[in-house]
Image (cartoon, grey):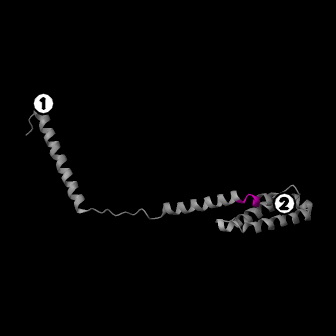
Amino acid sequence: MSMFGAECSAACLQALINNCLSSAVPSTRSELVGFSLVVMVVEELQSKLVGFGFISEDDRALVDYVKNVDSLFANKRCVQLLDEARKLLVSDIHNTVEVIHRNCLILSMQLCITTATDLKSELHVRVIQYGVILM
C-alpha cells in the first residue's frame, strides 16, 4: 500500500480537497460552528490513511487544510460577495426616467432669457467700444 500511496497520494489528497472539502467550507458564521465535526472526521481519516500506509505521518495536507478554516471561510465569503456585486453591476437597475417639474422648467427658461439678455447687452457695449456697427 505504501508504494501505491507514494505514487498517487498527492493527487488523491488534492482531489479530495478540491472536490469534497472545499465545498464543506462554511459560507456563513452560523455554519462555522458545525465545521468542527468536519475537522474531527478529517483528523480520523488522516490517521487511518497513515495506518494503511497510504500517506506518511509527515503528510498533513488534509488536516492543514481544515485547520485553516478561518482563511477559507473569509475567501469563500469574498468570492460570494464579489459574485453578488457582479450580478448587481450587470443588472438593469440603471434605467432612469427624466421628470421635469413645471416650476423647474419655468426657472430654467427664465435663466436662459436672463443670460441671453446679459449677452446681448455685453455685445452692444463691445460694439460701441470698438466702433463697429452691426446691422
Q: CA distance from mark 2 to mark 1?
A: 95 Å
Q: Is residue 27 visible?
A: no
Q: Is residue 23 above or below residue 128?
A: below
Q: Quadrant of residue 133?
A: top left
Amino acid marked by disc 1 = Tyr
Q: Quadrant of residue 52?
A: bottom right
Residue 19 in the image: x percent, y percent?
73, 65
Q: Quadrant of the N terminus?
A: bottom right
> 36 and 85: which one is in front?
36
Q: Is residue 53 left or right of residue 131?
A: right
Q: Which mark is residue 130?
A: 1
Q: Is residue 135 above or below residue 19?
A: above
Q: Residue at x 20, y 51 (%)?
A: 111
Residue 15 in the image: x percent, y percent?
76, 63
Q: Is residue 72 left or right of residue 118?
A: right
Residue range of the region highlighted in magenta in the rendering: 65-69
Q: Is residue 131 above or below residue 107?
A: above
Q: Is residue 70 visible?
A: yes
| Residue that numbered label 2 is attached to | 8
Residue 65 in the image: x percent, y percent?
76, 59
Q: Is residue 110 magenta?
A: no
Residue 3 in the image: x percent, y percent?
91, 60
